[in-house]
Image (spheres, coloured by chain):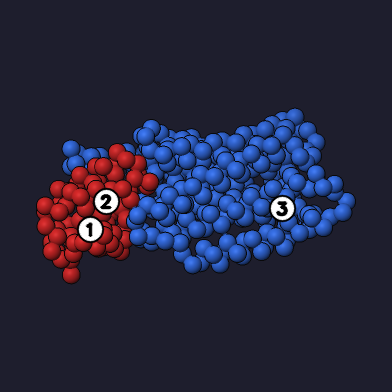
Chain colours: A red, B blue
């Protein structure tokens, strides 16, 4: 079970990438940064949001991906 | 959003009007005119909305140019139909192969294949956890085998046609099989997004490409067997292509520019 912060990230991503991909994305990016979704803290959000944003660029462009990234970084 | 809904209804009405005309079996001249006009309008609409979607990306976005290429491919396709319509319906010209429309249609293949494959690759390497569906390989293999056996092989074995003249009819089935394979791969890949909006534009774009390539392949086969006649329902595949791809373009634009709530929340 993901922590509250990770769950909030998934909620923001779900309308765009669907629930399954949102959960996997958060888990995968956390793992790549040596973090766990269960213990994710607000202070760790910015670099995590930046990593997720990179993946969205090819689908929605840098501007829109940046907006979603900002929402992600304010998720806590 | 209201405007988009109206556009969707107009496109649906045009498609249904074309279908009803085809089912009513009017005179051949009417069928030719209606079919050609519908194909031309649908494909021009697709080009316009794909260009609009490309414009929604910023100039720094590399993918913007792929969307521009896609729009140009559709524009070439639409121009081919427009010229074909003028030559056949208005000028009553004797259509031989290769003709001027063939030039535009053949040119549209690399212009469409390049951005489709580039975007497919871009999505796969985006970093999001999406991958090629194994069925992509099965359907790609099936398309290549069917196209090779039923369309390419008979052309190669035809001893009455000179080698150089074989080139034009060969380009169509080969190009269609590639587009079909790329479109099926993207469509299946986008299903991984489930109800997520990121995959919706490409689902429609890919379905449009599948409709066109399937129609092309059936048309090539029927023509080779002398079974194709004006008014065949496969003509509607190209109309469907235009409207589905136009809708895909509208959804892509909407995805980038339409969601103002996110922009406001992020500001």
Work out which quarter of the rendered image holds the N terminus of chain B and state it: top left
Rate crowding at label 2 as few (under 14), some (14 to 19) or many (20 or more) other CA atoms within 10 Å.
some
Report the residue at 72% width, 50% height from top.
B170
Q: Residue furthest bottom?
A: A1
* Residue B227, picture quadrant: bottom right
Work out which quarter of the rendered image holds the C terminus of chain B and state it: top left
- Mark 1 vs mark 3, foreground winner is 1
Q: Which residue is mark 3?
A: B220
Question: On residue B92, which mark appears?
Answer: none
Element under disc 3: helix
Report the residue at 18% width, 42% height from top.
B265
Q: Is residue B198 left or right of residue B120?
A: left
Report the residue at 11% width, 57% height from top.
A41
* Inter-mark Cα distance, 3 to 2: 47 Å
Report the residue at 46% width, 37% height from top.
B65
* Inter-mark Cα distance, 1 to 3: 53 Å
Q: Nearer the viewer, residue B25 or B160?
A: B160
Q: Which residue is mark 2?
A: A51
Name the subunit of mark 2: A
Q: Position of residue A10 (x, y in %)?
A: 22, 58
* Inter-mark Cα distance, 1 to 2: 9 Å
Name the subunit of mark 1: A
- Up the image or down, B77 lies above or below B206; here it is above
Name the subunit of mark 3: B
Q: Are marks 1 and 3 in contact (CB under 8 Å)?
A: no
Question: On residue A33, which mark appears?
Answer: 1
Q: Position of residue B146 (x, y in %)?
A: 67, 63
Q: Is residue A70 left or right of residue B3?
A: left
The answer as to whether the residues below labels 1 and 2 share one chain is yes
Q: Is residue B190 left or right of residue B156?
A: left
Q: Position of residue B64 (x, y in %)?
A: 42, 38
């Amino acid at each position: 079970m993901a922590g509250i912060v990770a769950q909030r990230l998934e909620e923001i991503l779900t309308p765009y990438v669907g629930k399954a991909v949102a959960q996997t994305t958060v888990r995968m990016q956390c793992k790549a940064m040596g973090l766990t979704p269960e213990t994710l803290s607000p202070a760790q959000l910015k670099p995590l949001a930046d990593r997720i944003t990179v993946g969205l660029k090819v689908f929605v462009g840098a501007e829109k991906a940046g907006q979603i990234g900002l929402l992600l970084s304010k998720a806590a | 959003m209201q405007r988009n809904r109206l556009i969707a209804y107009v496109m649906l009405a045009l498609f249904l009007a074309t279908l009803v005309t085809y089912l009513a079996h009017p005179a051949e001249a009417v069928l030719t005119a209606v079919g050609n006009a519908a194909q031309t309008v649908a494909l021009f609409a697709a080009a316009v909305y794909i260009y609009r979607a490309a414009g929604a990306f910023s100039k720094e976005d590399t993918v913007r140019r792929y969307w521009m290429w896609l729009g140009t491919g559709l524009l070439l396709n639409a121009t081919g139909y427009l010229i074909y319509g003028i030559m056949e319906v208005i000028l009553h010209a004797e259509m031989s192969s290769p003709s001027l429309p063939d030039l535009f249609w053949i040119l549209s293949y690399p212009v469409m294949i390049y951005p489709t494959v580039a975007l497919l690759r871009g999505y796969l390497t985006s970093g999001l956890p999406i991958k090629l569906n194994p069925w992509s390989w099965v359907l790609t293999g099936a398309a290549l085998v069917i196209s090779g056996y039923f369309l390419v092989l008979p052309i190669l074995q035809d001893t009455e046609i000179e080698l150089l003249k074989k080139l034009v009819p060969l380009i169509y089935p080969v190009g269609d099989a590639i587009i079909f394979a790329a479109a099926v791969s993207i469509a299946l890949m986008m299903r991984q997004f489930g109800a997520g909006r990121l995959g919706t534009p490409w689902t429609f774009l890919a379905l449009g490409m599948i409709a066109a390539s399937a129609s092309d392949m059936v048309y090539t086969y029927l023509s080779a067997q002398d079974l194709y006649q004006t008014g065949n329902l496969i003509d509607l595949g190209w109309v469907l292509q235009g409207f589905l791809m136009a809708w895909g373009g509208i959804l892509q634009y909407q995805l980038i520019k339409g969601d103002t709530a996110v922009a406001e929340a992020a500001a």
